[in-house]
Structures are given as structure tokens and as C-alpha cells.
């Protein structure tokens, strides 16, 4: 199991709900094609699952 995930924002935030925008912001993403490394824990897994159609995820 990975200790961290590399999350990349692949789609625009135009037209998505406020809660999904807040989730993207909490993951640390601001711009398209920006990548961040987030820890592998249940909270982050839930956030990634909520916006899985907007991001690309790779194990670190």
C-alpha cells in the first residue's frame, strides 16, 4: 500500500458544486495540471473519491 498519493487536477472547476470546489482546495490544488502529494489516510481517500472525475491519482 502506498504511503502517499500524487494527485493532479485534470479538469476545470467551472460548473461543479461548491462542496467539490472546497474539496479540491483542501487537497491543495488551485490550477489545472498542478500536482500535490497527499498522505494516504481515510480522510484524503474520501476527498479523492469525491472528486475522482476531476483528478488523476498515482501512488507515490
Image: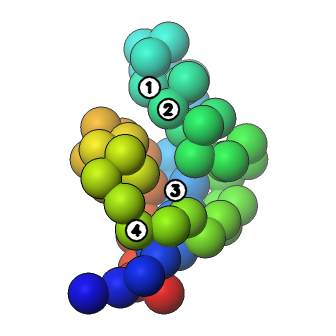
Please state which of the two labelled residues, at mark 2 or mark 4, is closer to the viewer. 4
Label 2 or label 4, whichever comes before in sequence order: 2
x and y, in percent, of residue 48 in the image: 36, 50
Badge 4, how many Cα within 10 Å: few under 14, some, many 20+? Answer: some
Seen at 67% across and 47% down, the residue is: 28
Which SS class for mark 2?
helix
Camera sees residue 12: no
Left or right, residue 29 beside residue 2: right
- Residue bearing mark 4: 40
Camera sees residue 39: yes
Q: CA distance from mark 2 to mark 4?
A: 16 Å
Label 4 or label 1, whichever comes before in sequence order: 1
x and y, in percent, of residue 56 in the image: 42, 65
Badge 1, how many Cα within 10 Å: few under 14, some, many 20+? Answer: some
Please state which of the two labelled residues, at mark 1 or mark 3, is closer to the viewer. 1
* Pointer 3 with pointer 4, Cβ within 8 A: no
- Residue bearing mark 1: 20
* Pointer 4 with pointer 1, Cβ within 8 A: no
Q: Quadrant of the N terminus?
A: bottom left
Residue extending farthest to the top is 18
* Pointer 2 with pointer 1, Cβ within 8 A: yes
- Residue bearing mark 2: 23
Left or right, residue 22 beside residue 43: right
Q: CA distance from mark 2 to mark 1?
A: 5 Å
Q: Nearer the viewer, residue 25 or 40?
A: 40
- Residue bearing mark 3: 10
Badge 3, how many Cα within 10 Å: few under 14, some, many 20+? Answer: some
Q: Nearer the viewer, residue 23 or 3?
A: 3
Seen at 51% across and 46% down, the residue is: 11
Q: How is the image coloured?
A: rainbow
x and y, in percent, of residue 46 in the image: 29, 44
Please state which of the two labelled residues, at mark 3 or mark 4, is closer to the viewer. 4
Amino acid at each position: 500500500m502506498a504511503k502517499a498519493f500524487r494527485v493532479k487536477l485534470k479538469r476545470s472547476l467551472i460548473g461543479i458544486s461548491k462542496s467539490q470546489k472546497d474539496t479540491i482546495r483542501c487537497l491543495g490544488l488551485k490550477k489545472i495540471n498542478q500536482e500535490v502529494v497527499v498522505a494516504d489516510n481515510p480522510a484524503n481517500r474520501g476527498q479523492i473519491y469525491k472528486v475522482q472525475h476531476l483528478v488523476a491519482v498515482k501512488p507515490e
